Image (cartoon, rainbow, N blue to C red):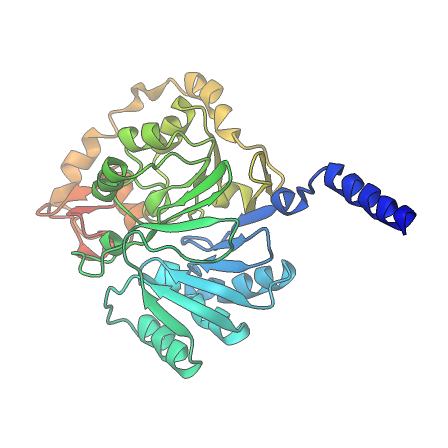
């Protein structure tokens, strides 16, 4: 009996001296920024295998988003977040809601009269998905190893972009700030109230200069900046200044129109970035040598032609055509201003 007691004591001591397993803490989290053209779609795959989709891109990208999710092993979405009801953020969600069971749906609460928004709400109702309107400081219990917090939401905003849900997802020392289409006023608000410092920043409004102010980028100090936009889009996104602001704080810029699907993988301490186009993170460094060569820019009498054009041409098919005449866009009240080209309703078309 004495020998048995001694043996048990020895085993207990041996177990107590064994190093504590940190496997749980070392599990990887993946955040995928899906190339959906001119729009946003972000898949968060937590360390414990939970899945959250933030936006679904435009309607035309719905099948691409569904295929991407299936390729990443998604069988169920624990959360779907619609940051705001613009078609380039929720259009693809109809296909997603039809393809996967969804446990929770988080909405901005901003009412929209589009058929796309109505179809989405009808599907949520039909499938009995738990529906919640986001409130500032809400925590989404996606995974106990993560802190997933709403830093901003406003269902009574003046327009849909200003209603954008801003999410911060933190895994130990690595964090992601997802800005939807939030503008500089919202940026000023959240940086005045909360810790916005983040490892990865998904810039607001596809890299438009209505977002991503110098002060905000300086406060976030990201290591990685993500610009999600469509190639040759009619809005002129992204604006060149945004990438320069990333560079000033030491961040690498990744762009869906250049790098395609972008994936950030982290164990909560370190992170790495891969992309499906296999291109370097800063191909923008090469245009610098070409600019000196292009310094025959004294051909800037071109800007003087636009001044003469308003008399003969005030109607344009799209922003690309307008910007040939007015490179900086036009303000409300200008003869060439068209409301349909002022997507963010800030009184400036094709900025």
Expressed as whole percent of the image width and height from the top left, the position of residue 38 reads 41, 53
Question: Which residue is depicted at the point 17% across and 48% down?
Answer: 346
Residue furthest front as drawn: 2
Task: Kindly tell me whether residue 263 is visible in this rendering.
Answer: yes
Question: Which residue is depicted at the point 81% across and 44% down?
Answer: 9
Question: Viewer-proximal residue, 2 or 74?
Answer: 2
Expressed as whole percent of the image width and height from the top left, the position of residue 152 reads 28, 50
Residue furthest left as drawn: 333
Instruction: Name the image quarter holding the C terminus.
Output: top left
User: Is 171 situated left or right of 128 in this image?
Assistant: right
Expressed as whole percent of the image width and height from the top left, the position of residue 31 reads 53, 48
Question: Viewer-proximal residue, 264 or 348?
Answer: 264
Task: Kindly tell me whether residue 261 is visible in this rendering.
Answer: no
Question: Viewer-proximal residue, 195 or 201?
Answer: 195
Tally the numbered discs. Answer: 0
Question: Which residue is depicted at the point 58% across and 61% down?
Answer: 69
Question: Which residue is depicted at the point 15% across and 46% down?
Answer: 312
- The quarter of the picture where residue 262 lies is top right
- The quarter of the picture where residue 226 lies is top left
Work out whether 244 lies above or below 271. Answer: above
């Amino acid at each position: 009996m004495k020998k048995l007691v001694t043996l048990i004591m020895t085993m207990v001591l041996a177990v107590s001296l064994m190093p504590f397993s940190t496997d749980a803490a070392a599990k990887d989290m993946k955040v995928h920024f899906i190339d959906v053209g001119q729009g946003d779609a972000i898949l968060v795959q937590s360390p414990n295998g939970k899945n959250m989709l933030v936006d679904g891109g435009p309607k035309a990208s719905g099948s691409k988003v569904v295929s991407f999710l299936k390729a990443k092993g998604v069988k169920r979405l624990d959360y779907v977040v619609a940051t705001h009801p613009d078609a380039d953020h929720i259009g693809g969600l109809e296909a997603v809601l039809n393809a996967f069971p969804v446990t929770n749906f988080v909405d901005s609460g901003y009412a929209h009269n589009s058929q796309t928004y109505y179809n989405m709400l009808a599907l949520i109702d039909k499938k009995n998905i738990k529906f919640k309107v986001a409130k500032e400081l809400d925590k989404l219990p996606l995974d106990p190893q993560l802190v997933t917090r709403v830093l901003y939401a406003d269902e009574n905003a003046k327009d849909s972009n200003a209603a954008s849900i801003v999410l911060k997802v933190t895994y130990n020392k690595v964090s992601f700030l997802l800005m939807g289409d939030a503008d500089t006023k919202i940026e000023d608000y959240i940086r005045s109230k909360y810790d916005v410092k983040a490892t990865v920043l998904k810039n607001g409004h596809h890299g438009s200069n209505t977002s991503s102010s110098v002060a905000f980028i300086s406060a976030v100090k990201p290591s990685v900046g993500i610009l999600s936009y469509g190639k040759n889009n009619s809005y002129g996104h992204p604006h060149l200044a945004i990438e320069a602001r990333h560079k000033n704080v030491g961040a690498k810029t990744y762009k869906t129109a250049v790098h395609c699907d972008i994936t950030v993988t982290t164990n909560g301490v370190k992170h790495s970035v891969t992309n499906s186009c296999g291109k370097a993170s800063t191909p923008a460094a090469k245009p610098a040598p070409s600019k000196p060569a292009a310094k025959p820019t004294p051909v800037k009498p071109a800007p003087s032609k636009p001044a003469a054009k308003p008399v003969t041409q005030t109607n344009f098919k799209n922003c690309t055509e307008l910007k040939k005449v007015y490179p900086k866009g036009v303000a409300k009240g200008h003869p060439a201003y068209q409301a349909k080209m002022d997507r963010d309703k800030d009184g400036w078309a094709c900025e």
